[in-house]
Amino acid sequence: MEVTLNCIVIDDEPLARELIKSYVEKTPALKLCGCFESAAEAVKSVVAGEIDIVFLDIDMPMLNGIDFAGIIPERTRIIYVTAYGQYALQGFKVNALDYLLKPVSYAEFMSAVGKAVKWCSMRDSYETQTRGIHESITVKSEYRLVQMKIASITYIEVQKDRVIFNRTDGGPISSLMSMRDLEEHLPSDRFMRVHRSFIVNMENIEVVERGRIIFGKTYVPVADSKRDEFFARLGKS
């Protein structure tokens, strides 16, 4: 099976950036989705979760490569391309797949790409296997155990000490759960916490108006801190 990985290149040095860009463009397993001179400029592109690999410099102004690693999605991996060998230990601590020292040869680049292809193939296989497990969720409601189809959930809201599941195929279900625990049980590729009091099923969103999600007569707010990620994910769905 052929694998094509979405990637971006981030480096504040023009020559180094263009070199890695040229390597990406002549590698069939890679698709270039963006080229940036700073990590800060790339944040919006990477938080949407559609980027597989980031070719990333470390020593950059505003937001360095180590700090940037802390804000990217879990399914995205980094290949560092840097002139500084002393950051290698820190790089591998943030799940970097490889650490390349400039100037990088195409052979070194391709060795790192091989690791990326292998890792992403294993990731995709795992996601395929576990997606079937997450087709339903069982919650305790009063003295009953209620099993709900994941696809039927539109949004979940906090009301005092309870969470309320709103669904397309039945009335609301109330349960004594925390939002944090609930987030761990819902597939992150389909659900997003858009506000401290709301989690939404991205696949069931039909109308967004003035920064609010509309489900029937309910208006779900999107927090300012979640706005960029929400609209990036919405545009990919």
Image (tube, rainbow, N blue to C red):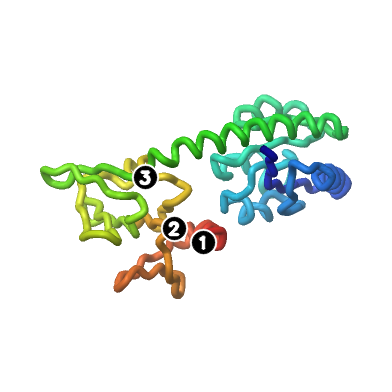
Q: Secondary structure at mark 3?
A: helix
The image's mark for residue 81 is: none
Residue under circle 2?
Answer: 202
Question: Which quadrant of the figure contains the N terminus?
Answer: top right
Q: Disc 3 versus disc 1: distance between alpha carbons?
A: 21 Å
Rounded to the nearest angstrom, the CA distance separating label 3 from label 2 is 15 Å
Residue in the foreground of this view, choosing between 194 and 29: 29
Residue reaching furthest to the left: 143
Q: Amino acid at mark 1?
A: Leu
CB contact under 8 Å: marks 1 and 2: yes
Can residue 115 be seen from the camera position used here? yes
* Left or right, residue 228 beside residue 83: left
Q: Position of residue 11 (x, y in %)?
A: 77, 46
Q: Is residue 219 left or right of residue 58?
A: left
Above or below residue 91? Residue 207 is: below
100 w.r.t. 24: above or below: above
Q: Which kind of residue does numbered mark 3 sit on?
A: Glu
Q: Earlier in the sequence, mark 3 or mark 2?
A: 3
The answer for how far apart the CA atoms under marks 1 and 2 are is: 7 Å
The percent position of residue 31, horizontal first and vertical second, equals 73, 48
Residue beneath label 1, please? 234
Where is residue 127 drawn, in percent x and y? 50, 38
Query: Which residue: 56% across, 35% down?
Result: 123
Q: Which residue is mark 3?
A: 135
Seen at 62% across and 36% down, the residue is 120
Depth order, front residue of 61/235:
235
Secondary-structure class at tag 2? helix
- The amino acid beneath tag 2 is Met
Q: Position of residue 206 (x, y in %)?
A: 43, 68
Q: Residue at x 40, y 56 (%)?
A: 201
